[in-house]
Image (cartoon, rainbow, N blue to C red):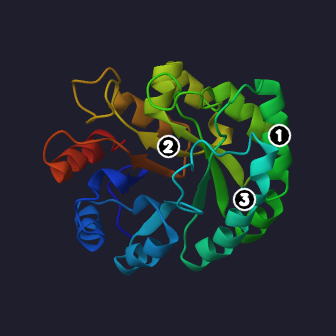
Amino acid sequence: MPGVPGRLKQSACRWPYRQIPLPDFCRAAAAMGLAAIDLLGSDEWGVVREHGLVCSMGYPAIRGDFIATGFNDRANHPLLLGELERAIPEAVRHGVPNVIAMFGNRRGRSDAEAIDTCVAGLNRIKALAEQHGVTICLELLNSKVDHADYQGDRTAFGVAVVRAVASPRVKLLYDIYHMQIMEGDVIRTIRDNKEWIAHFHTGGVPGRHELDDTQELNWRGIAAAIADAGFTGYLAHEFTPTHDPLVSLREAVAVCTA
């Protein structure tokens, strides 16, 4: 399997490179040493495998309201559980280790109510995820800049949910860009909560651009801290390039080779 030197398995999210046909993007990703492509619908999982890569994070469904419609609302549980029940066995067939899920928008709910509701819903799917060895990853997002009203906007909220679910197959997708905006203290937070995190996304702050010296984060230090914590999952790059996209991606891979 392809892989850059170092201790981290690196991936790239598909959406910033949609102008590049997926087979071409897979070839370019493999050539620069990436192990995987992130955030793909099930119709694309097989394409990635044909090019010797892994889909490191799959969507259980493609919906316009995917982020806002989360586990914090019991009315959403039939929809979300049905999608995951269909997607998890399919993920196994395609070698997809993770599927993404969302906490959803607040819409006036307290955090305490939302945590209880998320736990109730996830408890109904965790056995299937455990049976198939697929991890459901709930993403932490900022509500300050990009996703107004999103409830899972703090690490402590996400940890409260996955700790209560208490499954090795229900974890957090810790998006470094989003959590830098909301709370900062990234390295300490990762170290303190490493057992609850299954996946990482990168992205420069401000603007979600390249991981270069225009950004406020020390990406070499963050990558080293993740590797030092013994992380064995995927670190997936999710930033919007401002110049040649493959050059930007190659540079990000180099910066995060720890």
Give above or below for 223 relative to 63.
above
**Residue placed under numbered mark 1 in the picture:** 117
Q: Residue 126: percent from the left, percent from the top?
A: 79, 57
Whether tag 3 and tag 1 are in contact, CB under 8 A, the answer is: no
Q: Residues within 10 Å of mark 2 (few under 14, many from 20)?
A: many
Front residue of this view, candidates 11 and 23 = 23
Q: Residue at x 38, y 28 (%)?
A: 221
Residue at mark 3 to residue at mark 1: CA–CA distance:
15 Å
**Residue placed under numbered mark 2 in the picture:** 200
**Residue placed under numbered mark 3 in the picture:** 79
Secondary structure under tag 3 reads helix
Closer to the chain start, of discs 3 and 1, is 3
Q: Residue at x 23, y 59 (%)?
A: 19
Q: Residue at x 72, y 25 (%)?
A: 108
Residue at mark 2 to residue at mark 1: CA–CA distance:
25 Å
Whether tag 2 and tag 3 are in contact, CB under 8 A, the answer is: no
Q: Is residue 7 visible?
A: no
Q: Residue 128: percent from the left, percent from the top?
A: 78, 66
Closer to the chain start, of discs 2 and 3, is 3
Give the label, 2 or 3, closer to the camera: 3
What amino acid type should be assigned to the residue bearing mark 2? Phe
Give above or below for 19 relative to 65.
below
Residue at mark 2 to residue at mark 3: CA–CA distance:
26 Å
